[in-house]
Image (cartoon, helix red, strand yellow):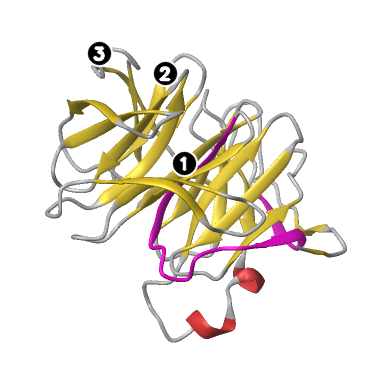
Amino acid sequence: MRILVAVMVIAGVGCSATDDQNPQPAAAIRLTAEPLATFPHRADAFTEGLLWADGALYESVGLVGRSDARRVELQTGGIETSTPIPAEQFGEGLAAVDDRLLQLTWKSGVGHVYDRTTMAEVDTFTYAGEGWGLTFDGRRLVMSDGTSRLRFLDPETFAEVGTLEVTDDGVSLERINELEFVQGLIYANIWKRPDIAVIDPATGTVLAWIDTTSLRPAETLDDPDAVANGIAYDPTGDRLFVTGKRWSTLYEIARPKV
C-alpha cells in the first residue's frame, strides 16, 4: 500500500438564480478526487458491485461466463473466496443486508442471495427489468436499472415500494449504475462517465460530482469498457473506496463533506 497526500479540490461552485416565485435547485458542486491510499486490484475483474461490511471487502464481477460474487483481501487484492453464478448470467450490483449478500444480474431478472460468512448461495429472488446497481439504506434496497430512476425494494420480499427520479440541475440523469449508501446520501457511478454523483435520496437531486479521471490506470485508456465503477464505504473508519472495471488499483479517497 502506498500512502499519498489527500486533497478533495473544489473545482467550482455554482448556484442557479432563484426567486420567491420560481425557486431553482442549486447546481451541483464539482470536486476532483485525489487518493489517500492505493491498494492492489485484480486487473481481470470486471467490477460491477463493490461494498465493505464488518471489516471485509466484497465484489461482484460481471461478464457472461465469468461472473461471481467474492470476498477480497484489501491489502493484497487477492480473492479469499468466491461463488460463481450460472454461465449465461451477467453479475451486477451487490448489497449487504444483515448476514446476507444480494447480487443482481443484468438481463436475467434473477438475483442471488449468499451467506456473507461462507459465500454459499442460500436463495434467489426475481425482479422486473434490468439490474445494474444495488445498495441498502438501512430500511430499503436501492436499485438502479440504467435509467434515471432509482427503485426502492423491500429487503425481505423484494417487492418494489417506491421510486425516485434523479436529476442534475433539473435534467434527468440517465445510465445510473453502481450504488453505495454513504452517510445518508447515495453515491452513484454513471456508466461511461468518470464522475461519481452524490445524490440526495429525499429529492433525487445531485448535490455534488466527484471526478475520478486522474485515477484511471494508464494501461486501460485504450479499453472503452474499463470505466470507473465500484464504490464501497467503511463507516467505522470513514473510508471511501473506488475502483473501475479492469483497473489494477483500488483507491481510498477523501469523503466530501456535502
Q: Write down the residue under mark 2.
A: 140
Amino acid, disc 1: Leu
Q: Are marks 1 and 2 in contact (CB under 8 Å)?
A: no
Query: From where the camera sits, is residue 134 visible?
Result: no
Element type at marker 2? loop
Q: Quadrant of the N terminus?
A: bottom right
Q: Quadrant of the C terminus?
A: top right
Q: CA distance from mark 1 to mark 3?
A: 20 Å
Q: Which of the two discs, 1 and 3, labels the residue nearer the N terminus?
A: 3
Q: Residue at x 43, y 38 (%)?
A: 166
Q: Which of the two discs, 3 and 2, labels the residue nearer the N terminus?
A: 2
Q: Which percent across, then down, holds residue 189?
A: 48, 52
Q: Residue at x 49, y 80 (%)?
A: 220
Task: State the mark number for residue 179.
Answer: 1
Q: Are marks 1 and 3 in contact (CB under 8 Å)?
A: no
Q: CA distance from mark 1 to mark 2?
A: 13 Å
Q: Which percent across, then down, holds residue 111?
A: 23, 34
Left or right: where does residue 4 sit relative to residue 51?
right
* Few, some or many residues within 10 Å of mark 2 (<14, 14–19, 20+): some
Residue 43 sits inside the magenta stretch = yes
Element type at marker 1? strand
Q: CA distance from mark 3 to mark 2?
A: 11 Å
The region drawn magenta spans: 29-53
Q: Which of the two discs, 1 and 2, labels the residue nearer the N terminus?
A: 2
Q: Residue at x 62, y 39 (%)?
A: 233
Location of residue 237 by image quarter: top right
Amino acid, disc 3: Thr
Look at the magenta stretch and give its main secondary structure. Answer: strand
Q: Nearer the viewer, residue 178 or 67?
A: 67
Q: Residue at x 66, y 44 (%)?
A: 17
